[in-house]
Image (cartoon, coloured by chain):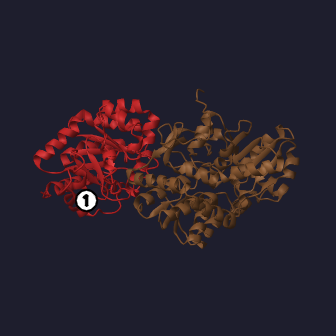
Amino acid sequence: MTARLDAKFAALAQQGRAGLVTFLTAGDPDPGTTLELLTGLPAAGADVIELGMPFSDPMADGPAIQWSSLRALKAGQTLAKTLDLVRAFRAGDDTTPLVLMGYYNPIYVYGVARFLADAKAAGVDGLIVVDLPPEEDDELCLPALDAGIAFIRLATPTTDDQRLPKVLANTAGFVYYVSITGVTGTATPDFDKVGAAVARLKRHTRLPVAVGFGVKTAAHAGAVARGADAVVVGSALVETVRTSLDAEGLATDKTVPAVLGLVRELAAGVRGAVRAA
Amino acid sequence: MTVHQPNSFRTGPDERGRFGDFGGRFVAETLMPLILDLEAAYAAAKADPAYRQEMDGYLSHYVGRPSPLYFAERLTDHFGGAKIYLKREELNHTGSHKVNNVLGQILLARRMGKKRIIAETGAGQHGVATATLCARFGLECVVYMGAVDVERQKPNVFRMKLLGATVVPVQSGSKTLKDAMNEALRDWVTNVATTFYCIGTVAGPHPYPMMVRDFQSIIGRETREQMLATEGRLPDSLVACIGGGSNAMGLFHPFLDDPAVEIFGVEAAGHGISSGLHAASLSGGKPGVLHGNRTFLLMSEDGQIDEAHSISAGLDYPGIGPEHAFLHETGRVSYLSATDEEALAAFQLLSKLEGIIPALEPAHALAKVAELAPARPKDHLMVVSLSGRGDKDVPQVSEMLESRL
């Protein structure tokens, strides 16, 4: 049921390297640019695509992703248009796993059953919904699993050994380890601690562990890739989108090359990492 | 409507923090362990007589409780109907009902060993109350406030700074209360080990709506005793303004299972519900999930949260406490709304007739009393929550009225 994700992580394990998960916000700065970026990502070295569903009040995100959401919403992005983007991407790529990331309210308002059916049909493999902890599993997590879409749970430094089984219970696809206590794109993680945290998670689950929050450069990505199954980069990419825009906030001919260029660097960092034994 | 009528309206929330379908715990995983700690710490404190005793001591000697239940004779004569009583929460230390809740939370934070307190504020009353109690107990205090509100509530911003708090103007989103709450949540996620988040209203993830309600229920409990002592019977109706709804919930809760007591909550209709520029989540919103709970919200068809509009920064929030959403759906409480203009008129009326300048928030409740009271018989006992005093609003209102006075 999580075929694309499972196949990807199996292939990565076979190659003996970590994967690169890249985050972009759907519709930032416009749907056409997002589609161009999405179609370019796999060749630039992205192994898994995380696509943000913009929300007006992204409480768990730092300034970079907040601003990317606002740019997208200002340009008229909606949840329906985000699913259109997935469909358009899937038309040309049937293998790269794609997960949607966001907040619950737009999904709740769209209607959970309708959303899951439309997301499945569009080719979505997984969901990361940051304001749905295991205590609220029956809202979306369990229906998503029934619909054949992985619900990817975040584990954090505050998730202790006693709580971990609860967090992992209905998680599928991979586990997303949040390497800092904080919002996206702010502090740089302590890479030694990240290694220990991934090892701790591995004692509780056989799922792949992806690590994100605060990974900005190829060197960071390489450091995380030594111990994790995948590295997630988001804020650094949406910042690259922002700095490539013109004075009106519109995409320029620099936007796509700049973002894909950074993805290539990050992918090289991840692929060059020497794996921990 | 096919909403189930419970035997008691006072049993919520359930173990999942739900009032019917509303409430819950919709927060990031980083915060969940802390929310569960808080729930346990609050349950332990509630069961500890020493905590209750400590709180009662401060409520009497620092806050100045009980607050009077005052018979507003001239207001009553003016409307010519119901006998109107004002529950004088504006006489509390710091000038509003907010201090009742903050005291409870700060004493809890001390029990939990937290040294740093964060809060969000709209009009600044909750920020002032939090800064005050942090000063009293020597705790670090950081208050998030939308940049727009910092501008329109200068007296309270100065007060908070004088009390030693750091006021952080929030520049994101609409730069009002909802954005201040987002920013406070971001701070909490970042500093979760040392920090206690003191939420100012009956909203947020469980256990906040329950905890804040419990702390504010002293308003209704006192009203009950005072009315029985004065009139020998319960009031016939209760009226309170609602932003998040903490003063209202505090007044209403002890009366919810008295079916003869009519209860009215008054939301801010801003320029009018049909204008789209208002803060009336129940009258003009629909159910959604924000800031840790499911409740009625102002939002677009795509689930993006709208800005709220009200003359009163304290009511300018696109949501409402989940217990109010439940009481709305069950029909136990009637929710009305008053416009900016109606509130301004009531603000002046109470000042002139009773020598009491109300905050713009309870002026919304008073505005609806103007409709409710005349239609009631003279032996009808109506209690209005006077949740805060108007000092903070005087500069803003004077600007608006200058041309008319």
Q: In this view, does A64 lie above or below B296?
A: below
In the current view of this chain or complex, which residue is farthest to the front? B49
Residue A121 % position (x, y): 31, 29
Residue drawn at x 60%, y 61% as measured from the top left: B103
Circle 1: residue type: Val
Q: Tag 1, which chain?
A: A
Residue B50 % position (x, y): 58, 62
Residue A97 left/right relative to A156:
left
Residue A203 left/right relative to A24:
left
Position of the C terminus of chain B, as image quadrant, is bottom right
Residue B268 visible at all: no
Q: In this view, does B290 lie above or below B158?
A: above
Q: Residue B221 versus residue A257: which sits nearer the camera?
A: B221
Residue B375 % position (x, y): 82, 37
Q: Residue B46 versus residue A72: which sits nearer the camera?
A: B46
Task: Describe the element under mark 1 as helix, strand or loop.
Answer: helix
Colour representing chain A: red
Residue B158 left/right relative to B229:
left
Residue B323 % position (x, y): 58, 42
In the current view of this chain or complex, which residue is farthest to the top? B2
Residue A270 visible at all: yes
Residue B375 left/right relative to A65:
right
Q: Residue B245 versus residue B279: which sits nearer the camera?
A: B245
Residue drawn at x 11%, y 47% as measured from the top left: A15
Q: Residue B44 versus residue B221: which sits nearer the camera?
A: B44
Query: Which residue carries the number 1 mark?
Result: A194
Q: Could you classify mark 1 by the number of other residues whose Cα lies within 10 Å: few (under 14), some (14-19), or many (20 or more)?
A: many
Position of the N terminus of chain B, as image quadrant, is top right
Q: Which picture quadrant has residue A191?
A: bottom left
Colour representing chain B: brown
Q: In this view, does B144 lie above or below A110?
A: below
